[in-house]
Structure formats: C-alpha cells, structure tokens
Image (cartoon, grey):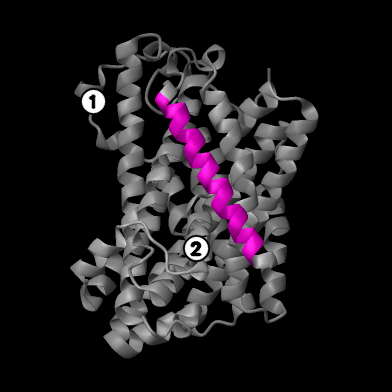
Amino acid sequence: MYLSKTEAAVLPTTLVAGPRRPPQPAGRRRIWPLLGPAFVAAVAYVDPGNFATNFSGGASFGYTLLWVIVAANLMAMLIQSLTAKLGLATGRDLATNCREQLPRPVTRGLWLQAEAVAIATDLAEIVGGAVALNLLFGVPLPVGGLITAVVAFVLLAAQSRGHRPFERVITGLLLVIGAGFAYTLVGSGVDMGGMASGMVPSFAGPDSLVLAAGILGATVMPHVIYVHSALTPGRYGDVVTAGRTREGRRGLLRAQRLDVLVAMGVAGLVNAAMLVIAAQLFTGSAEQAGSLEGVHAGLGDQLGAGAALAFALALLASGFASSSVGTHAGQVVMAGFLKRHIPVLVRRLVTLAPALLVLVLGGDPTTALVWSQVVLSFGIPFALVPLLWLTSRRDLMGGWVNRRVTTVAGCVVAALIIALNGHLLLGFVL
C-alpha cells in the first residue's frame, strides 16, 4: 500500500516506523524535548492581524480591554489542548476525522470554507511581512509580499527533515517577536493600577465591544486547530501502547498540556504587551495607532529608533513564521478533507494571489488586515464545533474522551466566540 508523506505523518507511529520501545512514565522523561507542536500553533496567535487589533484597542480604550486578551488566551489554551488530544487519541488530524465521520457533502463544505480561511490567513500574513520589509528597508509593498512568500516557503521546506527542525525555526521566530515587545515594554513602562482595572470585565461603549470581538477573532485562529491536531500523532512515543493504560494517558496528556500552557502563555504575554504599550504611549492618539506605519513612527518619536526597530523586526518575524504555518495548514486541510496532495509551490501561488493583488492595487495594508480577520471569524465555528463533537465521543476517543465539565466549558467557549464574532460581522455590515 502506498502512502503519501502527508498521510504517513498522521498515522500512529507504530504503523509507520514499526515497533518502538515502550515509553517510560512521563515523570521519568525529559520534559523539554517534548515541547514543540503548540509553539507552531502559538505563532498564529501573534500574527500581523493581532498587531492591528491589539494596538488599536490599547490606543482607543487604554487598559479597558486587557481582560479580553486574557480571556481569549484562556480559550485558546482549552481549544488547542482539545485538538492536540484528538491527534493523540485517534492518530489522525481534525480534517481526516471529519472526512471519516461526516457525510461527503458536509466534508466538501468544510473543505471549501477551510480553503477560504487559508486564503484570508495568507492575506494577513503576507501583508504584514510586506509592511515590515517596507519599514525596515523601504522595499515596495508588492516586492515585500513576494519576499515574504519565498521566505515562508523556505521555512516550510524544513519539514522535509521532520517536524522538529520546523518547530525549532518557528519557536525561534516566536521568541524574536517576544523579545521585541519585551524591549519596547521596558521603555514604555507599565501602569499597575491601569492593568488591575483592565482585568475587570467591562466595556467603554459599543465601539469597544466591536473591538473586543475583533481581538477575539484575531486571537482564535481556525487554521491552527487543524495544524495542531496533525502535529501530535506519534509525537510522544508509542501512543498506541501508552494510551491503553490510565497512567499512560495521564503522562501523555501532561506532556501536551505543558506544551500548550507554555506556548499559549508566551503568545498571551506578547498580545498583552502590545495593548499595554499602546495604552501607555498612544492613548488619545488612536488615529496614529490605526495603522502599522503609524505605530512604527510613534514608537520612534516617543522611545527612539531602537523601539521602532524592535517593532519592525517583530512584525517581520510574525509575517514570516505565521505565513509558513498558514501554508502548512492548507496542506493539512486538503490532505485531510479530500485525501489529496498538491505541490506546495502550486498551493503557495494560489493563496498568494489575493495578497499580492491588494498590494499591487495600492490598498491600505492595515484595512486589509482587519478585513482578513472578519473572514477568519467565519471559519472558527466550522473548526471548533466538529472538534467538540469528536472529542466528546467515547466510541472514537475511548479513554481519551472529554470529561463532562470539559465539554460544557468548550460549548460555552464556542457560544461566546460565535456570538462575539457574529456581533463583529454585524457591526461591519451596519
């Protein structure tokens, strides 16, 4: 039987590489080498779309919406933990499970919307990378878009050597983003009283509610729900053997939960830092923070060239890393829903076209970023609802099935995301 690389990657390790040494209890393992898949997913939580919404939120409403970032990050931890567990329990990614468990018309519909999500994702990330190259080197935006696409393609090629090299590269870029905002945060300072008040759930009028929905829509990314479930099968040793015992399952779940906690924690701190910096420096000048170019100029004026450089480098790392993850998501989606695989270069050209069109026609990059988040908000329920349904089925998950409280919490999160993103869409329409 012939298996493509994509199909082989989602099979349990015992079916691909043959028998392996029975895993030791999790407590005896070295923990750090087990981290990685969640860091790939975490990059999508600090993509260029987050830059636009977080800086706009801090500049317009100060610390008021800080609690939204914290809440969205907690939701992200739950969602990414569930999708990682699905991959561990079934040895297959979310898209493949949907194809096997749902009628073909439903599967085709899910595939079409997932492809639309992939295009919107690429739009945000290519545009973000192009803006960063323009700020750093004065590269014209269309040329910057092409450079971002090429670099992302090269980064994705690291997967030919296995998941680990790709994960290391993406984790390194995530750390660059974090270091850039840590440097800027030290310069801007923090109002502890403002942070404390911002942790109390509240809004400052209808506009803040719309922006809160935008922050949530930019934070919970549907494409990484598919990607994360494709990275965990076979990752933590012999899942088939270990998953047969309660202690084995606990050990595997501890490993992936730690991965999610650390990675999503880093992403959450970066998002919070964006809003805090904007609240400290741009409150009262929301128009300047309404564009990435304005934020870059404002940081240079108030904190010096070092802060402006740190912002541009963080934006560049975000565009490069998130674009490569977005392309990988497209591969996972097509292989899972349709059981087909097309060359990465062909897929790259298809998803790149809308982004280059925006840049060539001279569209406003920040506006394009915002509208890409609107399109992404459509895709969240189509990934999250099947995920909850699959992970709550004992006949599919066996001993890995969700506890009742986990399913209830997931349903509450899904309802909140759907309601807030629906409000966001309604706000844009009206």
Nearer-the-camera pick, 83 or 91? 83
* Residue 258 to residue 370: above or below: above
Quarter of the N terminus within the rendering: top right
Nearer-the-camera pick, 244 or 272? 272
User: Can residue 165 be seen at all in this image of the molecule?
Assistant: no
Q: Which residue is mark 2?
A: 209
* Residue 333 percent location from the top left of the image: 64, 40
Residue at position x 70%, y 48% in the image: 115
Q: Which residues are magenta?
A: 405-427
For label 2, count other residues whose C-alpha is less than 10 Å away and answer few (under 14), some (14-19) or many (20+). some
* Measured Cα–Cα span from mark 2 to mark 1: 45 Å
* Residue 102 to residue 218: above or below: above
Q: What type is the residue that disc 2 sits on?
A: Leu
Nearer-the-camera pick, 97 or 391? 391
Q: Quadrant of residue 296?
A: bottom left
Horizontally, residue 37 falls left or right of residue 12, namely left
* Residue 230 to residue 277: above or below: above
Q: Check if residue 415 falls in the magenta segment.
A: yes
Residue at position x 69%, y 39% in the image: 334
Q: Which residue is mark 1?
A: 29
Q: Quadrant of residue 348?
A: bottom right
Quarter of the C terminus within the rendering: bottom right
Q: Secondary structure at mark 2?
A: helix
Residue at position x 47%, y 69% in the image: 205
Q: Secondary structure at mark 1?
A: loop
* Residue 39 percent location from the top left of the image: 39, 46
Query: Could you tell me what secondary structure mostly forms the magenta stretch?
Result: helix
For label 1, count other residues whose C-alpha is less than 10 Å away and answer few (under 14), some (14-19) or many (20+). few
